[in-house]
Structure formats: C-alpha cells, structure tokens
Image (tube, rainbow, N blue to C red):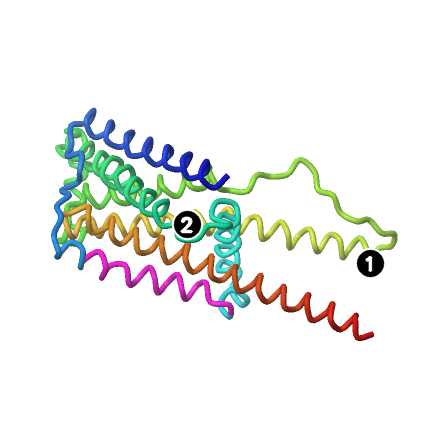
Amino acid sequence: MVANFELSLAGLYAGLAFVGQAICKVIGIDCWGGFEISPEAVLDGLGYAVVPMLALLFIQDDAIVNAWAPARAVRDVEDGELMEYFEGMGWQFLPIVIAGALSEEIFFRVALQGGFSHAIQASASLNQTPQGLSALTAIVPSFAPFAQILAVVLSSALTGSMYYVITAPKDPTYVIAPVSRGKQALKDMRKRFEVWNERRTMKKIYSPLMESLLALYLGFEWLQTGNILAPMVTHLVYSNVVVGNGLLRLHYQRLKLRQRVASIMGYRKDL
C-alpha cells in the first residue's frame, strides 16, 4: 500500500516538474532558474530556512495552538495531511519530501514566477505607457526590479489559490448530530455546530495563507540569490521539519493515549 502511494506521488511530482519545464520552453526562459551547484547557494538556502522553521515551530507549539485559533487551524490541516499521506512511514517520507520540494520549485518558482516576470517585462503596453509598470518603479525597493517583485506576488497568490482548491475541506451534503428535546439541548447543538463550522472556515483560510507566505518568501529568496538551488534547499529543509515534527508529535500523542487506556484498563481490573 505504501509502495503504491510512493509511486503515485513520484508520478505526480514528475508530472509537475515536466509541466514546469514545458512552460519554460514555450515561453522561452531559462528552464533551470540559474541552477548551479555551489557551497554558497547551499549555505544561503540553509540560512534562509531558519526564519520559516522558527515560525513553524512557534506556531505549532501547544501553548500557541491552544490560545490562537489560526494556529489551531494550521495544525488541524497539517495533522490531517500527515495521517492521510504519511501515516505508517518511517524514513520513506524523505524521498517523497525531496521530490516534492524540487518539483514545486521548478514549477512555482522557475516556471510560474519566471514566466510572470518575463511576460510583464516583455509587455510594451505595461512598460512604455505613463500608466505602466515603469511609472511605479520609484516606489519599489532597489534590490529587485518591479516586474520581478510583481511576479513573486502573483506566483505566491496563485500558489495559495491552488492549494486552497486542492486541499480545502469540502462542505458536507448533510451533518448527522444527536437531537434532544428541549431548548437548551438545541442551543448546545447549535453552539457545537458553530464551533465546528468556524474551525472548518479557519482551515480554508489560514492553511492556504501559510502556503502563500512561504511561496512569497521563497520567491524573494530566489531574487536575492539568483540560483534556484538556494530556495530548493530552503524548501527541502522546511518540508522535512514540517513532516518530521508532525509525525513525531502524532507518535507521542498516540503513545500517551495508549498509556492512558492501559492505565484505565488496569484500574478497572483492580476494581
């Protein structure tokens, strides 16, 4: 079962990378995003990975999750994906995460972001008219042209939108709930439904938002480094931390649950 799942994911990621390469060839841009193996790019990628890793570990802390609803929503989505895609895996998740990080960088960064930047810079109507992009260049920081910055924003927004469409929980056709007589019972049931619906709405909003912010961060990293290897390393490290930390947390949660069940069963036997 796990082997079949790994093969299907490998095919999905290979297809994503192939589509990205095809887009680059059709548009006529560099298919590899300035890829060059160098210690400097690897170190840059590791350095850039610190910020999203610390943000992730902060958001996933139990105290933050219990006190902040958006963090709770992000963890709910993450736990659902881990249990659906990575449950029962050991080291096998590493090649899957590696393939996912590399293919997503080729597609979202090199193809989409590079394609948006190329299209904006090549558009005469945008660059030559007083209302075009050239008129707005002065308000943009000097570390990158405006077309490239706009391409980062557009590609990150598209990333979040695609993630929303693919992973957002579908609205159920109906909901089964216990019905009791009395006004108080109806109020309690309505309150529980409102809480449930609020958590579903949170999942739809904040998990894609996190993906958009990560895409925005990786896009600016690519602008700064000029080598797609750097955001590849950052994405790879971040994804491994997400999956590894999540699987470890779920393992300890199940271990605690088993210990509690064992203690309850032992207590009943003593009675």
Callout 1 amino acid: Gln
Q: In the rendered view, would you say 271 is above or below 125?
A: below
Q: In the rendered view, would you say 112 is above or below 144?
A: above
The quarter of the displayed image where residue 269 is located: bottom right
**Main secondary structure along the magenta-highlighted residues:** helix
In the picture, the disc for residue 218 is none
Image-based side of 228 in relation to 170, left or right: left
Callout 2 amino acid: Leu
Residue 204 magenta: no
Image-based side of 87 in relation to 209, left or right: right
Image-based side of 30 in relation to 92, left or right: left
Residue shown at 46% from the left, 67% from the top: 61
Residue pointed to by mark 1: 184
Foreground residue among 60 and 239: 239
N-term mark: 2 or 1: 1
The number of numbered discs placed on residues in the rendered structure image is: 2
Residue 57 magenta: yes
Image-based side of 88 in relation to 216, left or right: right
Q: Which residues are magenta?
A: 44-62
Residue 90 x %, y %: 43, 53
Q: Secondary structure at mark 2?
A: helix
Foreground residue among 200 and 268: 268
Q: In the rendered view, would you say 24 is above or below 108?
A: above
Within-10-Å neighbours for mark 2: few <14, some 14–19, many 20+: many
Residue pointed to by mark 2: 209
Of all residues shown, which one is farthest toward the right? Answer: 181
The image quadrant where one finds the C terminus is bottom right
Q: In the rendered view, would you say 4 is above or below 74?
A: above
Q: Secondary structure at mark 1?
A: helix
